[in-house]
């Protein structure tokens, strides 16, 4: 049986504030037999700036 491949979306909140949560997610998925990867092209979604009131500036990240 082929190993499932799971794409990880690591938000900046996880990346910068709670990296242990992201690592735990990867650990669990790999323990369950999944191959995990983080796309190199992944960029910021703009949520932090949008939530801070900079809605126009946030749209430039999309």
Image: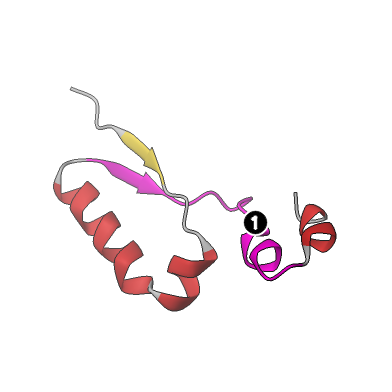
Tell me: residue 9, above or below residue 34: below
- The residue at the point 48 percent across, 68 percent down is 13
Left or right of 23 in this view: 54: right
Q: Does the magenta segment cover residue 58?
A: no
- The residue at the point 38 percent across, 74 percent down is 18
Residue at numbered disc 1:
43
- Quadrant of residue 33 in the image? top left
Please state, as top left, top right, bottom left or bottom right, where the N terminus lies in the image: top left
Tell me: residue 44, above or below residue 4: below
Left or right of 32 in this view: 53: right
Residues packed near mark 1 inside 10 Å, few (<14), some (14 to 19) or many (20 plus): few
Q: Please, what secondary structure does the residue beneath circle 1 have? A: loop
Q: Does the magenta segment cover residue 37?
A: yes
**Which residue is at the front of the view, 57 or 20?**
57
Task: Specify the color scheme.
Answer: secondary structure
Q: Position of residue 50 (x, y in %)?
A: 70, 62
- The residue at the point 65 percent across, 56 percent down is 43
Q: Main secondary structure of the magenta part?
A: loop
Residue that lies at the very extreme toward the top in this rendered image:
1
**Magenta stretch in the rendered image:** 34-53
**Which residue is at the front of the view, 12 or 29?**
12
Residue that lies at the very extreme toward the bottom in this rendered image:
17
Q: Position of residue 39 (x, y in %)?
A: 54, 49
Q: Position of residue 55 (x, y in %)?
A: 78, 59
């Amino acid at each position: 049986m082929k190993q499932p491949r799971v794409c990880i979306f690591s938000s900046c909140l996880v990346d910068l504030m709670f990296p242990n949560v992201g690592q735990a997610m990867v650990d669990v998925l790999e323990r369950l037999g999944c191959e995990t990867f983080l796309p190199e092209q992944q960029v910021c979604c703009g949520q932090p700036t949008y939530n801070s009131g900079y809605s126009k500036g946030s749209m430039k990240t999309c």
